[in-house]
Image: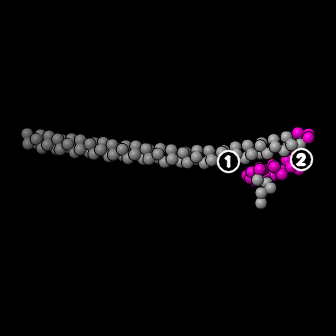
Amino acid sequence: MVANEIAEKRRAKNEAAEAERIATIADVEAERNRQNEARRVELKRVHREQKLAKRALNIEIASGLVDLIMDLADETHDITSQSETNQISNPEWREFMHLFKKGKKVSLRNVQ
């Protein structure tokens, strides 16, 4: 009978230790899940900031390009409307394209 009691106590002690080990593992997994979620939220925030910065840069570039195109169109219209043939000469058009490719406004070509 004493042996049965000792075996029962050992089994109860082992079961308690196993339950504690399982609880510890569950706590560790829960903490890891919280850390992973926090990391995911932080990465999402950083990604959003990078995306907004990239969008702002793209808007700035596009705005500058539209300004150059509109300036080129205005100058071309002014030149062709003053011409008897309603055309722009090839050398002048090449000069316009050269300035446009350099990112400079055609309307400022004669300004030093």
Look at label 2 and name its amino acid.
Answer: Asn
Extreme residue in the bottom direction: 112
Answer whether residue 95 is magenta in the image: yes
Residue 51 in percent (x, y) is at: 55, 45
Crowding at dot 2, Cα within 10 Å, few <14 / some 14-19 / many 20+, comes out as few
Q: Quadrant location of the N terminus?
A: top left
How far from the left and from the top, in percent, is residue 95? Answer: 83, 51
> Relative to 107, is 46 on the left or the right?
left
Q: The residue tagged with tag 2: helix, strand or loop? A: helix
Label 2 with label 1: CB-CB less than 8 Å: no
The answer to whether residue 48 is seen in the rendering is: yes
Which kind of residue does numbered mark 1 sit on?
A: Gly
Name the quadrant containing residue 33.
top left
Q: Which residues are magenta?
A: 84-107
The quarter in which the C terminus is drawn is bottom right
Image quadrant in which you'd find residue 12: top left
* Of callouts 2 and 1, the N-terminal one: 1
Q: Position of residue 22 (x, y in %)?
A: 27, 42
Query: For the residues marked 2 and 1, what is the alpha-carbon distance in whole angstroms?
Result: 25 Å
Instruction: Describe residue 110's horizontal placement relative to residue 59 as left or right.
Output: right
Residue bearing mark 2: 90
Give residue 50's position: percent from left, percent from top.
53, 48
The label number, if any, that marks residue 64 in the structure image = 1
Image point (85%, 40%), residue name: 81
For this view, does 35 lie left or right of residue 13? Answer: right
